[in-house]
Image: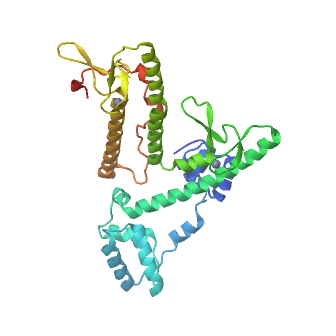
Amino acid sequence: MAGKRYNTEELQRIAALRERGLSIRAVALELGRTPAGIQSALRARGWIDAARSEVMTSVNILSPEQRNAFREFVCARAAQCTPTDIRNAWNKEAVGKQWPTVNNERVLYYLRASGLKKTKGEYMRSDSYRRRQSAAQRTRRAKELAAFLRTLRARRTEMYTAEPGVPRRKCHLCHETWPLSDTFFRHSGRGRKYFLKTCRICYHNLSGTAEERRKQRMRAYDRHVTVKQIPLAKAERDAFLHQHRNFPTRSCPRCHETWELLPKRFPKYKLASGSELYRKSCRFCLRADARLRERRKLETNRMQTTMLDHETRNLVEPGSQADFALPQWDLLKEAPIIKEAPIIGRPNGR
Ligand SMILES: [Zn+2]
Ligand SMILES: [Zn+2]
């Protein structure tokens, strides 16, 4: 990727950040560059991991006997293991026998020569590949978090010095006290008016994987419905029925709540004759159904996308592991109830 040239200052920063163990991704974020750009800048200057390049160049010579044994070893495991698994297994045995150890490239060479090399997609599907990936991801995240924590602590010291009276908040989880500002706390809720009780570090820790975050958003929305929307509607209903004592009501067979017989509580549907009827279930129950349906659909789509990716893996450039862009459940996706158009044309009022 040909981007803007790196100046000396940037290169020094890259070196310093890598020294501190930050991932290429994290460095790219810091510098406002792409990870690919950082990678090629490092490669161009020979700043690659010394230990790793050591292994790459030290190819040990196998004797003819060892070579045959190695070929058999590789072929016997080709179906179940990834090249890395095979390498590790061989090297473990080799130490005892005082045989040469091998690197991944050599395993790949033998797999290719025997016509047993799998595609990237096949390896990506294997458990050991996934385990390694997620372990690597955890390590990366831990390092990034540690760096983030150091930065925040330094900022806090600066702020306390510059502005001793700044409002503070003790984080619920880590019990560290931070200045109550955007740098240290995220905002909560729809109005984005209040700061959360957990600091950014803990919030980040809690939020886990993309999948977990998606689930959290769904749970947050469900909570919002049960603790905010429904009680609000009930209060509204009570006040309304107090004023209009003989107003028709209907009990929802699902939630057993009695609501005013109004379109904002029970959606209507049209009969062939043109007349309209109220549906039997209340809007809250119908919307809960719709939500569940949409989530199931999303989940199915996601699985299909993953499977499709494996099927078309030959078209996918090796090394490209971009996350799937998924439509995500969002608090803002659902407009307030009152604004929703009535659902028309659903028979039998379910
Ligand atoms: Zn915290
Ligand atoms: Zn209901």
| Left or right placement of residue 333 versus residue 30 in this view | left
Residue closest to the eye, 160 or 112: 160
| Left or right placement of residue 5 versus residue 180 in this view | left
Name which quarter of the figure residue 325 lies in.
Answer: top left
| Left or right placement of residue 57 versus residue 317 in this view | right
Q: With respect to residue 147, does 274 lie above or below? A: above
Residue located at (32% from left, 28% from top)? 252
- How many discs mark residues in the rendered view? 0
Residue located at (46% from left, 62% from top)? 132
Residue located at (48% from left, 83% from top)? 95
Residue closest to the eye, 11 or 169: 169
Q: Is residue 286 visible?
A: yes
> How far from the left and from the top, in percent, is residue 12?
69, 52
Name which quarter of the figure residue 131 lies in.
Answer: bottom left
> How far from the left and from the top, in percent, is residue 23?
58, 54
Q: Looking at the image, what colour scheme do you see?
A: rainbow
> How far from the left and from the top, in percent, is residue 230?
44, 29
Residue closest to the eye, 337 or 254: 254
Name which quarter of the figure residue 142 lies in.
Answer: bottom right
Quadrant housing the C terminus = top left
| Left or right placement of residue 345 versus residue 196 in this view | left
Q: Is residue 14 visible?
A: no
Q: With respect to residue 262, does 294 lie above or below? A: below
> How far from the left and from the top, in percent, is residue 155?
73, 45
